[in-house]
Structures are given as structure tokens and as C-alpha cells.
Amino acid sequence: MAEVLVVADDLTGANATAAGFAGAGLRAATASVASGAEAITGMLSRFDVVVATTDSRHVAPDVAAGMVRSTVRAGWPARLVCNRIDTTLRGNIGATTEAVVAEVGALTGTRVVALCAPAHPAAGRHTIGGTQLLDGRRLEETEVARDARTPMRTSDVAEILRQQTDLPTQVLPMASVTGRREDLVADIRSALDTGVAVLVADATTDEHLQRIADAAVAASEGMELVWVTSDPGPGSVAMARALGLHPAARGAPLLVVSGSATELTRKQLQQLAAERAATVHRVPCLPGSAVPDPEAATAVLVDALSSAGPADIVVFATVIEDSDVRPTSAEDADRIPGNSRAPCDGRWRGTPWTGCSPREATSLRPSCPSSSRTGWRSPGRWCRWPWRAPSSAGRGTACTSPPREAWSGTSRRPWPAWTTCAGPWSWSAAMLPPPGPGHPPDRSTGIEGDAHDQARTRTDPGRPRGDRPGDHGTDAGRAGRRGRPPRRRRRGSGGAAARRRGHGPGRGGAHRRRLRRGACRRGHRHRRHRSARGRRPRVGKVDERAGRAAVAAIETATRAAMDQKVAGIVTGPINKEAIWAAGSKHLGHTEMLGELTGVTEQDTMFVVRNSAAEGHHLRIFFTTRHVSLRKAIDQLTKERIQDSIRKAHTALQVFGVQNPRLAVAALNPHGGENGNFGDEEIVHIAPACEAAREEGLDVSGPIPADSVFHQGLVGRYDGVLSQYHDQGHIPAKTFDFDGTISVTVGLPILRTSVDHGTAFDIAGTGKAGHGTMLSAYLAAVDYAPFVDNIRRTYGS
């Protein structure tokens, strides 16, 4: 059995926690249980600490709780069970804490109390008065308030727990923590006597954490009680010390695996070899390539570990000297192992770890290996693997290779790197779906398998061109050239794909190069495209060819999104006359996307990205849209408004707002003044709000329209339901024209768009701004992590 079982909600935190236990002298290992808790069963007898990552930070609370409980059962028995939570308290900390308490209680048949000490002093996280501080500031005043998935609106630890659990919670204040030990023990004992299930402790130093853990163990003496922990790691390490957990005596070499090619890492490896007499082995590569050879690498590692003694340090690194950094070619991408991954895992876990298993291993943090810059994408942010210098720590973390389901972990660099020691390769997956059977992700597109031959221009997110003679050519070009966030996106899909297929008159650079080479799918030398009339489309004028190109771009990008080859699509404005001239019968994007995706009902969600409250994005929904004001008023009924409330509430949850607060705008001036200025509020809007509240939704209203949007902008509400088109458009565009974008909800794909038209009157003058287009791009990147939610909720 393992001495300590840690259940973490993401890989980064799991590695950091394992490194912390390793620094305390315990042999620690990290494994992914995202595809099943049985992944850790073979590790329990070999390590003092097993850290299992569920990758459940952003799933539904009940799903996260279920994964935690199954992992605890698979890892039982253990002397200490820890629930590793984020240092900024994001994710399902209430649900997972309750799951650990409940499952350990069921397994032991005794009372279980969770010690929640969320401070992480080394990372600048402190807890004072039950409030979590990040570098001295409340969470809602820091960048985590703008987190796209879990924006933090409070720093009250007990309040955050109460959002997902009803367990009795009490705060252990700083006065107790820093007071006499006898008083601290007495305060904890008093809390236990009152029936507390979660004890939240203040702390600003590691010494505080150790005092709390020691006092907790002392306070529970003589009681039928089991302690568990819920913290970012340091509190659990302190509890392990307080419980007297020590490593078992097992002699084996220390294995260090490095996949980083930075100059700093090379210096660290050289220092390790010089100061600790470490034996350094290069990872062998395929002939004439920078891609590692799995067969040769396995053989080298087996020989190295077999000949190493218990006190030896074995270093296995891709890059040791400057000469080891080699450029890659497009062909290298196809040579990286794909389906060979599983047998490689077996060899590494079997042969080297049986009979000659290292006592532990440490993985140097992967950086930007210039030998591996192949441009692959990964969803979310990039994972920072915790680096522990073996020259000073002496012990590290054995990291098993995550399964495919875990490849969507968080990385910061879009290229592969050696990151694990129990499996030879772990590369970042394409932005949305992880690579499936077949080829690894294509070097230029990030699309797996045979699909990249048909989609070489598709990356994440897809970008239809919009109407080319309008302002979008200026708009999109500036957004791409000037405003593109580094490494967050590349070319769009629809426009380039459509032009390369001959659907449009555009002449991109790649297209010109193909023409110069004489490359043509029909096998003959190409001529420059001209229309039958021999002229190009004129800027600012309706042209059926531009409409045809826009339709083709939308269709191409939508198909890519439906086939899960891109995260979603970002659309520019299109001219209705142009697409009608091209033969389209649709009124616009919405109807076209509905037909392409098989959806009959869609709604618009405006997102005001630059709200008055820092980190807060106001979402605006619409009960009616493209009808006259007279018809809009006639269409307002209790049933329609109530249905719009439900849809808005669902959309907010889909896009990461766990407990949505929705306000409903009134129709008439001053909310109707009790029927004196109109009775729609009394007859339709107020009854709909009341019915929604009876369903358990957090709905306020009707609120006069001249104040409700301001209240939403300052953060009082997550969304506002407007009653007609201009009621929601005017405040959003007046407050922040460039920062307001549109998201279509109800589609099984992610689609963001600008909130303006083609502006033919200023096309070609250089006056068109790119701010809204850039905002639409950034919104698509921010919302990409919710694509699975979108497909589950709105898919067929």
C-alpha cells in the first residue's frame, strides 16, 4: 500500500504536489486516471506517495466527485488521503472535498474530517481570516477573476466550499495558528467537538502549516477520527510529517528524464553530472532525424538502469550539449510514434522497472526545444511541469505517461517535448480533439490522420473570410497581423481553404506560389483567375463572386468544425445582397449555419468583453431579434420569455458560469410604473421570472432597461435578457463597440462573430477598425475549452 494517496484535478498540480512530497523524502509518482482509476493499482506497492490526476477541474461537480471516489477506492488503503486543490481555488473544490470525506468515511467506518489549509507560501498564496490571497490581493482582484472557465468572484474559502457542499465548515483564525500550541490544540479540539467536517486554516508560512498539522493530530488523540486534507500540497506534506510517515527502505538508482532543449536546462544537466557524479545518457534518434528512436531508447535505458547501483543517478536527456539541438523537417512529424505508444509504455514500465526499478525519477520541466518546434496545438493553457533540481533535492517525481484523454492537458508551448519517464513520448494534441488512430498531428495544421490531406489550411479556430469587397479584408488582415496573440492561433481555415479550392477570387501568397510552380489539380498550367467579364471584384460594391466565396468559406469552416478538425469558427460580416446574388436563399449566417448543422433553433449571446468590472464579461441575450419593434412586442408572452430565460441560463453554464445570475430587462419606461406605462411587465415578464425562480434559477426582474445593463456591466449579473434587438445592442455597442462580440448558442459547434456589418461605405479607405474582429478571435480562443460542453448540450 502507499503511505499517501493524492487525488489532483489537473496534471500540473499533481506534479507539483508529487515534487513537494519528494522534497520531503518520500518516493512520489504521478499517474493519470482520467480514463480509469485502475491506472494507479500497479504503483501502490512501489511508491510512498501516489498522485492520481483526474483532469476534472472543469467538469461538472458530480462527475468530478465520482472520479475522486473511484480513485480513492482504487488506491485504498492509504494512511493519508489528500484532495489536491488549485492554489487559486478554481474548480470543484467543494464537491471533491466532500467526495474524499464521504469515501474515506465509507471505507473506514469512522468519522472523517478534512483539514483545508489552502495556503501555498512558496507560490505567494496566503490565507488570512479565511480569505485566500494571491500575492497579497484577493482572488477577485487578480487575473484569476478573468479565468475563462472558472472566474473567481470571491476569496472566502468557506463560501467557495459552500457553493458545492453542505459539510459543516469552520475557520481556524491566524490568532490561533500563531498563538500558544496548547491553545491551538484546544481550538481544534473545540471545533471537532462541535461536529465540524471541514476545518479551514489560516497560514502564511510553511511553519504555520506544520503547526496546524501537528496540532490537528494532537487534538484528535483519543477520538475515533480520520484526517484527510484538501489543499494545494504543502498542507498535505505537513500532515504527512505530523502523522510520522516515512519512506520505506528500497535501494534503487535515481532516474532523471529531461525533454527540454533550453540553454538553462543544458547547464543544469552539466551541473548535475559535475556535482553529483550523474551518468548522462542521450536519447538515441532515428537515422538522419531529430525524432527519438523508441526501440533504441528503451534498450539504452534498460542497460543504464541495470548497471546502476542504488546510490547512482541516471540522466536520460534528449539534449545535453549545444550540438544536440537539431532542426526538424516536415517529414519528422510523420515519424513520431503514434500507435506504437502503448507497447513502448509496456516496455518502459515492464523491463526497466522490474528487478532494476529506480527508486524514483525526476522530470526536468520541458521548455521550448528548438529541435521539436512543429507547431502543434493544445487546448487551454500549457502545463508547467515542476522542475526540481536533483543536484539539490536528491529526490524527484516519477511521472507516468498520460493516456490520450489526458493529452489535452495544459501546456504553454505548441510543440512536443519529452515530459515523462514511464512512456517515451507525450506531445501536445491538436487544439480540439486528441489524435486518434492513424498519423500523428500534421505539422502545419495540427489535424490527425488522413484528414490533413484534405484540410491542410485548417487550424483553430476556423475563420471564414466574410465579404471580401467590404471592410472585412482590412478588418481581418489587421486583426491577424497586428493583434494576433503569439502562439494562440495561426491562419484561419475557411477563407484560405475556399480560395485554394477555386471558390473565390482571392489571391493569397500560397495561391500565388502554387501558380508560379504551375501546380494545378487538373494537371495543366494555371492561369490567373479572372471572371467571365475579365475583372476583379470592386471594393465596396456588391459582387456575386464575393458572395459565392463567402458562402464557400462558411460551408468549409462549418464542415471542419462539425468534423471536430477545428475548435470552432470565427465569422466576419457578410453582405446579404451578395450571397443572394450568388444563389443563396439564406437570410444570413444564422440560417446558413442552422442548415449546415441541422439545427432549427439558435440564439444570440452578446459578450461585452471589456466590462466595467475587471475580469467580468457581461452576456446579453434576446427574447426577440430580427423583427420590427411592433412585432417584437406582440411576440412577448410569458411562455416565450420563460423559454428564453431557460436558454440563457443553459448557455451561461455551457460557457463556464457555474451558478449563473440572470437579470431580465423590462420593456416599458421605468418598468411600466405598475401598469401606467404599459402592462407587459405585469402580464408577461414578471410571471415568467417568477416561474423561472420556482424552477430554481437565479433570476432577477423585470428591471428597468435604463439601469439593468449598467448593473450587469459592473458585475452584479452574469447575463441580461433583453426583450428586443436594439434594447440589448445599443448599450453593448455604446459601452464597448470593439470589445463586444456575438456567440451563436444552440449550435453543436463554437461560433463567434463580429457585431457589425460589412461597412461598404468605408471599404478600401483604411478607416475600418479591426478591434471587433480581434475580440472575436480572442473570444474563440477563450471559449475553445468549452467545445465539449457545447457538443454535449447542443449536439444531436
Image (tube, grey):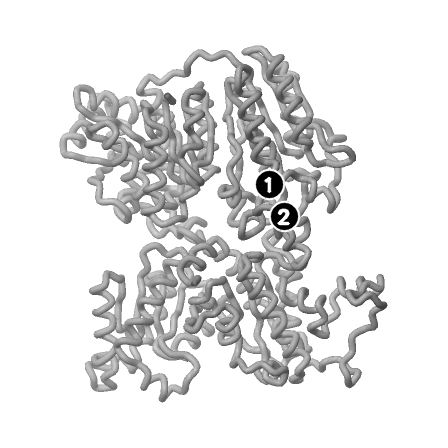
Mark 2–mark 1 Cα distance, whole angstroms, equals 9 Å
- Residue 180 visible from this viewpoint: yes
Q: What residue is rendered at 68% in x and 80% in y?
A: 545
Helix, strand, or loop for circle 2? loop
* Along the line of sight, the residue nearer the viewer: 545 or 708: 545
Q: Which residue is mark 2?
A: 441
**Amino acid beneath label 2:** Pro
Note whether residue 768 is visible: no
Where residue 638 appears, as percent x and y from the top left, is 26, 77
Q: Looking at the image, which residue is at 58% across and 49% down?
A: 430
Quadrant where the N terminus sits is: top left
Q: In the orientation shown, which residue stands out farthest toward the left?
A: 194
Q: Amino acid at mark 1?
A: Trp
Q: Which residue corresponds to mark 1?
A: 427
Q: Nearer the viewer, residue 245 or 7?
A: 7
Would residue 755 be found to the left or right of residue 767 on screen? left
Q: Position of residue 23 (x, y in %)?
A: 46, 22
